[in-house]
Structures are given as C-alpha cells and as structure tokens.
Image (tube, grey):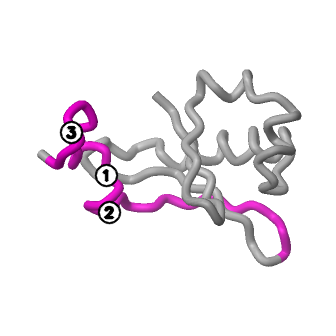
Amino acid sequence: MNILHLATQYGDLEIREVELSTITDAELQKWEFGISREELQRCFAQGVALMQGHTPGERLRPCASQRLDRSWQVRLVRYSPHDDPLMHDHHRGRAN
C-alpha cells in the first residue's frame, strides 16, 4: 500500500493511495496547507518513486513538507519508536 505523509503544523497527515482520488477541493482548502491537487499528486508520485527498492523492515516513509519558498519537497523519513505503527498495539492502546 502506497502512502504519503504531509508534514503540517498540526502533525503529520497520512494519505493512502486509495484516498488520493477522493480528496475534495474543499478538503484541500480546509486543511490550509497551501497544496494544490496537482502538487499533492506530484508529491505522492515522488514518494512512491523514492520508496522503490526499500523494504518495510527499513521503517522508512515518504514525507512531504513545505519549504520556506512555499514549494513542496518529498524525502524519506525514518519512523521513530514513538510514531512507528509496528511498535504500538492500536487495538489495546499499548506498546507491544
């Protein structure tokens, strides 16, 4: 499953590939991230390309963040123990 994390002032927003086509213009405006649909799609495609050749065991994720010039940059970010989904039992609310 392909995903992209958008780094925001409120924390990372995870967008899954199946959700990409269902995001409305109203949602993009509501998020107030300053990202257009075209830019979001470009970032998602770049994230998919960056993840090629990497395995889940490497614990990497593509993350898009806005630069000071308001353009968006995608890079691979390593999960920390605090936000790694494999380190938490989401059904019981505790770490494994």
Q: Nearer the viewer, residue 9 or 18?
A: 9
Q: Which mark is residue 80?
A: 2
Who comes first in sequence, dot 1 or dot 3? 1
Q: CA distance from mark 1 to mark 3?
A: 11 Å
Going by the numbered disc 2, the residue's amino acid type is Ser
* Local SS, label 1: loop
Q: Pointer 3: what residue?
A: 89
Q: Which residues are magenta?
A: 69-95
| Residue 53, image x, y percentages | 40, 44
The answer to which image quadrant residue 11 occupies is: bottom right
Report whether 19 appears left or right of 85. right
Query: Badge 1: how crowded within 10 Å, few (<14), some, or many (20+)?
Result: few
Q: CA distance from mark 1 to mark 2?
A: 6 Å
Q: Residue furthest left?
A: 96
Who comes first in sequence, dot 3 or dot 2? 2
Select label 1 or label 3 by which is in front.
3
Q: Which mark is residue 84?
A: 1
Asked whether disc 3 touches disc 2, contact meaning CB atoms under 8 Å apart, the reply is: no
Asked whether disc 1 touches disc 2, contact meaning CB atoms under 8 Å apart, the reply is: yes
**Total numbered labels placed on residues in the image:** 3
Report whether 26 appears left or right of 79. right
Q: Residue at x 86, y 44 (%)?
A: 29
Q: Nearer the viewer, residue 54 or 78?
A: 78
Select label 3 or label 2 by which is in front.
3
Q: Residue furthest front?
A: 93
* Local SS, label 3: strand
Going by the numbered disc 3, the residue's amino acid type is Asp
| Residue 57, image x, y percentages | 24, 46
| Residue 4, image x, y percentages | 57, 44
Report whether 61 appears left or right of 40. left
Q: Residue at x 31, y 44 (%)?
A: 85
